[in-house]
Image (cartoon, helix red, strand yellow):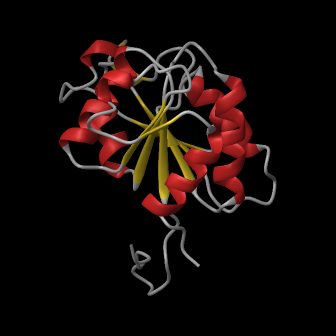
Amino acid sequence: MPSLPNNDGGERRRLIAVVGSGSEPHADIARPLGRWLAHEGYHLLSGGGQGVMAETAVGFRSVLERGGLAIGILPGLAKDGKIAAPPGYPNPSTDLAIRTHLPLTGAEGQSPMSRNAIIVLTADAVVALPGAEGTRSEIELALAHHVPLLLFSPGGEWAAYEDRAPAASRLEEVFAWVGEAAPKSR
């Protein structure tokens, strides 16, 4: 895949969405994945919340010489006539929080009133870590919209989708897949 030009004729950094549990951090896989993405020059895209989203961003931001940003697409809730992100959003390791008016999450993640479509359609590639209904909706959106998707399923969490998308059980497999699915600009 060729590099993507910017309006100024330069090349843009690739955005890799990491989706997964909003409550379980899976730090043993999320942090090293975040560090690797930062070292390789990617932007990190997530839902900007807790769990996997926060842990991947912690790993990403631990690389001081990184060129990319940890970007979070946040849900929005109406409160006192204003739209605000729910508690825990954005996590402290999000560099750029993009606030939305879209309140639905979890099992309602495929709804037009969820930010999940923005996350998936903005990404050059999606890596799905273990998660629940919200992650499942992001997997299904990536499949429906033909966005490159890798199921990072060390315990077989996403076996039901392995006939429709490639799967990995080790970080080294994830790194190789991202490098092929979304080659970084040189």
Left or right: residue 113 versus residue 65 is: left
In the figure, 133 relative to 159: above or below?
Answer: above
Residue 43 visible, this angle: yes
Left or right: residue 93 versus residue 153 is: right
| Of residues 178 and 19, the one drawn nearer to the viewer in this rendering | 178
Left or right: residue 180 versus residue 76 is: right
Name the quadrant of the C terminus: bottom right
In the figure, 127 relative to 184: above or below?
Answer: above
- What is the residue that sits farthest to the front in this orientation? 163
| Of residues 166 and 140, the one drawn nearer to the viewer in this rendering | 166
In the figure, 38 relative to 110: above or below?
Answer: below
- What is the residue that sits farthest to the bottom in this orientation? 9
Q: Residue at x 56, y 45 (%)?
A: 174
Occupied quadrant, residue 30: top right
At which x and y percent is residue 152?
A: 50, 33
Q: Residue at x 41, y 14 (%)?
A: 132
Q: Residue at x 73, y 44 (%)?
A: 61
At which x and y percent is residue 143?
A: 24, 40
At which x and y percent is residue 20?
A: 49, 26
Q: Residue at x 63, y 40 (%)?
A: 171
* Count of marks, rendered view: 0
In the figure, 170 relative to 181: above or below?
Answer: above
At which x and y percent is residue 75?
A: 39, 26
Left or right: residue 145 versus residue 84 is: left
Name the quadrant of the N terminus: bottom left
